[in-house]
């Protein structure tokens, strides 16, 4: 199992997300602090990648720059060849905390995004989209429950439904299962990957969990520790899709992949 070269280039028509010489600097009283420098990464259409690295290596900074929520200090980020200029509906984000409107129902929270992205849809078309994705995440009986009445796991299901419902070109996930217990975490990984298998939206996810990275990804991207963090290694995960947890765990390469990632993190 060889890792791909870090500078692997894909044909322009294959690339959904392109990060070129990305740089992020924060000014401090003691001078500039360089979080990221010379970071290059291409993500293919319909690819699911996860990003791992030590806390403070700039993973979340990078993700928030892709989302358009954090200014780029240098380099560029492009979606389908067009440089991003702030947030946009072409990029959906699922955060660690679901960030729902607590006084609104699950349905109303999803509808907020759907109305923005499909302003010309009929009332029925928009309602169908909301109901479809809420059903997909297993919330059939909870359309009209207020977000404040839902458990954390159920709130995160609403967050997943909302992100897919706006049909983004790129789905960004910032440790979406990090605050959940392991049973709920496993259930939501299955929910996420089941919808993703159908929708095939290009996805970039941050995780601290090596097993989660292997189960979900086409490639695992490892970041060096900051300051001046960049891509340190990339590991292709060559399990067939759709995958089940059972077949992944039983696969001969699973423990090799796991060792590779842990060895990187321990150095």
Image (cartoon, rainbow, N blue to C red):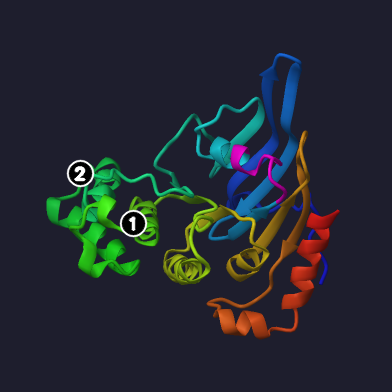
Rendered position, 165 above or below 65: below
Report crowding for label 2: few under 14, some 14 to 19, many 20 or more residues within 10 A (C-alpha). few
Q: Is residue 35 magenta?
A: no
Rendered position, 17 above or below 69: below
Secondary structure, magenta segment, majority class: loop
Report crowding for label 1: few under 14, some 14 to 19, many 20 or more residues within 10 A (C-alpha). many
Q: Quadrant of residue 248?
A: bottom right
Left or right: residue 21 versus residue 247 is: right
For marks 2 and 1, give the one nearer the viewer: 1
Percent of width and height locating residue 132: 26, 64
Q: Quadrant of residue 21?
A: top right
Q: Is residue 55 magenta?
A: yes
Left or right: residue 101 versus residue 192 is: left
Residue closest to the eye, 263 or 82:
263
Left or right: residue 50 versus residue 68 is: right
Q: Residue at x 73, y 24 (%)?
A: 33
Residue closest to the eye, 97 or 143:
97
Residue 120: numbered disc: 2
The quadrant of the picture occupied by the N terminus is: bottom right
Percent of width and height locating residue 74: 67, 26
Q: What residue does disc 1 label? A: 158
Q: Quadrant of residue 50?
A: bottom right
Q: CA distance from mark 2 to mark 1?
A: 23 Å
What's the magenta region? Answer: 53-61
Percent of width and height locating residue 59: 64, 44
Rendered position, 242 above or below 47: below
Q: Residue at x 74, y 62 (%)?
A: 235
Q: Could you tell me which secondary element the residue under label 2 belongs to?
A: loop
Residue closest to the eye, 48 or 96:
96
Percent of width and height locating residue 267: 86, 53
Q: Could you tell me which secondary element the residue under label 1 belongs to?
A: helix
Q: Residue at x 57, y 27 (%)?
A: 71
């Amino acid at each position: 199992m060889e890792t791909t070269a870090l500078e692997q280039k894909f044909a322009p028509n294959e690339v959904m997300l392109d990060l070129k010489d990305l740089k992020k600097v924060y000014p401090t009283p003691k001078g500039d602090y360089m979080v990221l420098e010379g970071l290059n990464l291409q993500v293919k259409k319909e690819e699911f990648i996860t990003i791992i690295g030590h806390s403070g290596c700039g993973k979340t900074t990078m993700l928030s720059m892709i989302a358009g929520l954090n200014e780029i200090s240098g380099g560029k980020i492009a979606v389908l060849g067009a440089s991003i200029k702030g947030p946009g509906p072409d990029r959906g984000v699922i955060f660690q905390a679901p960030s729902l409107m607590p006084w609104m129902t699950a349905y109303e929270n999803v509808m907020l995004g759907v109305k923005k992205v499909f302003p010309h849809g009929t009332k029925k078309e928009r309602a169908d989209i909301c109901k479809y994705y809420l059903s997909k995440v297993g919330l059939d009986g909870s359309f009209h429950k207020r977000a404040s009445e839902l458990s954390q796991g159920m709130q995160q299901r609403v967050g997943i439904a909302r992100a897919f419902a706006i049909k983004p070109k790129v789905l960004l996930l910032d440790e979406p299962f990090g605050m959940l217990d392991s049973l709920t975490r496993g259930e939501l990984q299955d929910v996420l990957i089941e919808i993703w298998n159908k929708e095939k939206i290009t996805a970039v996810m941050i995780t601290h969990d090596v097993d989660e990275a292997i189960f979900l990804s086409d490639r695992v991207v490892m970041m060096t520790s900051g300051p001046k963090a960049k891509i340190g290694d990339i590991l292709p995960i060559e399990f067939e899709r759709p995958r089940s947890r059972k077949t992944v765990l039983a696969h001969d390469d699973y423990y090799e992949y796991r060792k590779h990632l842990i060895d990187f993190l321990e150095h």
